[in-house]
Image (tube, grey):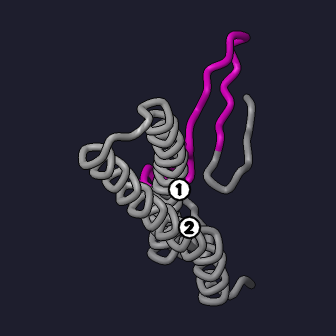
Amino acid sequence: MINKEQVIDDTKDVINLLTDTTEIDAKIVECENELDIVSELVKKIVRDNSKEQQNQNDYAKKYEELETRYNKARKLHDKLAEEKEAKIGKMKILNSYLSDFDKNGTIIDKWDDNIWMTALENAIINRDGTITFNFIVGKSIKI
């Protein structure tokens, strides 16, 4: 017979491993620091340009380089934030699934809409009339 508590504990460990955002959080902080640095550099060159006469081609080139650097950091920051949100969303779904499992016995012997909706990531109706069910655990079934 299956040890339900052991399955729940093991599943919690897997959920924590799959949804850990520690590394992403550190990278987000790095991006935010880069954004702050670039913002200050832009302020400085704009301030310097307003106070003293400079070659405007050199100024425009520096400004453009900083703008490119800023946009690169912003793009990475946004990608990381999206990735973090996806992990948090996945964690909520998996915890909900685990909670439903915990409420039920070790064997699910009747239909449960909540378990189905939690376990199913999406269903795709194919052109040939078949349906592909994609589950949150990465499995797919085509019928």
**Which residue corresponds to the image point at 41% horizontal and 32% vertical from the top-left?**
56
Q: Amino acid at mark 2?
A: Lys
Quadrant hosting residue 32: bottom left
Tell me the element at label 1: helix
The image shows residue 132 at horizontal and vertical percentages of 68, 31
Q: Is residue 5 left or right of residue 116?
A: right
Asked if the residue under mark 1 is in contact with the one under mark 2, i.e. CB atoms within 8 Å, the reply is: yes
Label 1: how many Cα within 10 Å (few below 14, some 14–19, many 20+): some
Q: Which mark is residue 27?
A: 2
Front residue of 7/64: it is 64
Q: Work out which quarter of the rendered image holds the N terminus and state it.
A: bottom right
Q: Which mark is residue 80?
A: 1
Q: Residue at x 44, y 35 (%)?
A: 55
Q: Which mark is residue 41?
A: none
Inspect the magenta stretch and tell me whether residue 143 lies in it.
Answer: no
Residue 23 or 33: which is nearer the viewer? Answer: 33
Q: Is residue 118 magenta?
A: yes
Circle 2 — which element? helix
Q: Quadrant of the C terminus?
A: top right
- Please report the bounds of the magenta region as a residue range: 112-134
Closest to the camera, between mark 2 and mark 1, is 2
Going from N to C along the chain, the mark reached first, 2 or 1, is 2
Q: Quadrant of residue 13?
A: bottom right
